[in-house]
Image: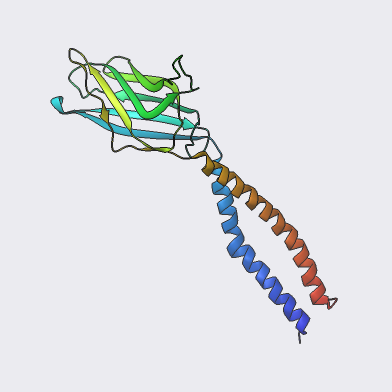
Amino acid sequence: MLCALQTLAIIFLLGLVAFTLFIFPSILEVRRGNSEFQKPHTSHISFIDTIHDYNSNIKVDLKIEYPHGILIVNDSVKISGVVDATELPIRVISYTLGFYNAQEYPVNQDEKGITKLAQINFQDQGNNKLVANETKITWTLEGAYQPVITPELENIGKLPPTQVVSTIITVHPKSLMVQIIANNTNINLAIAAYFLGIIGAINIIYRLWMGII
């Protein structure tokens, strides 16, 4: 029959196995998620701009790149895109897209201390297709931002700016990234402590089993 110390050793071992199987994987999953937030991220946004006078749609595809898994205040954001207006029976001369509070990156001020707001300008490539090369912008304020678009049509001129309510880009405070990095550091320390604890636990289990303790 097993003595009390050996029974205690088995219970200790079962607890260690249960922790490894059920809790430790969750810790690793959180660590992976936090690590992903610290990697560069690319997202694609598409929306439709309807020109009601012609009952036609303009398709807009944007590629947005930023240095973290989430968009943070003062991040350098690269935006490029394509506008497809082939449904429209009239030529689109230019297409401008902007966001509230978006500024050119790096942020510069004129002699009056005013910063220049950023715009993404799409250039005509023929056949009613327009392309915007990479433009760097940034947001200095957190918030949820929607694109503001301004098409310019041949023989008509620029249409009034329109806000795209179906598309939202969320800019998070810098404190969120600081918190994610701190959490990841704590998790790494916890994992290191876990492996050190395993070594100590195995030693204790052995000593219990052998009746040394």
176 with respect to 192 (left or right): left
Q: Residue furthest top?
A: 155
Q: Determine whether 203 is above or below 133 in the image.
A: below
At 73% from the left edge and 80% from the top edge, which residue is drawn?
7
- Judging from the image, the colouring scheme is rainbow
**Residue 170 can be seen, yes or no:** no
Tell me where residue 169 sits by quadrant: top left
**Measured from the top left, where is residue 192 in percent x and y?**
71, 54
Count how many numbered circles sit on residues in the image: 0
Q: Determine whether 196 is above or below 168 in the image.
A: below
At 43% from the left edge and 35% from the top edge, which residue is drawn?
43
Q: Determine whether 75 is above or below 118 in the image.
A: below
Tell me where residue 137 sits by quadrant: top left
Q: Residue furthest front?
A: 112
The N terminus: image quadrant: bottom right
**Residue 50 can be seen, yes or no:** yes
173 with respect to 181 (left or right): left
**Measured from the top left, where is residue 211 in percent x and y?**
83, 78
At 67% from the left edge and 72% from the top edge, which residue is drawn?
14
Q: Residue furthest bottom?
A: 1
**Measured from the top left, where is residue 84 in percent x and y?**
29, 24
**Viewer-proximal residue among 181 and 44:** 181
Q: Determine whether 4 is above or below 120 in the image.
A: below
The C terminus: image quadrant: bottom right
**Measured from the top left, where is residue 151 in percent x and y?**
26, 21
At 21% from the left edge and 25% from the top edge, which residue is drawn?
87
34 with respect to 136 (left or right): right
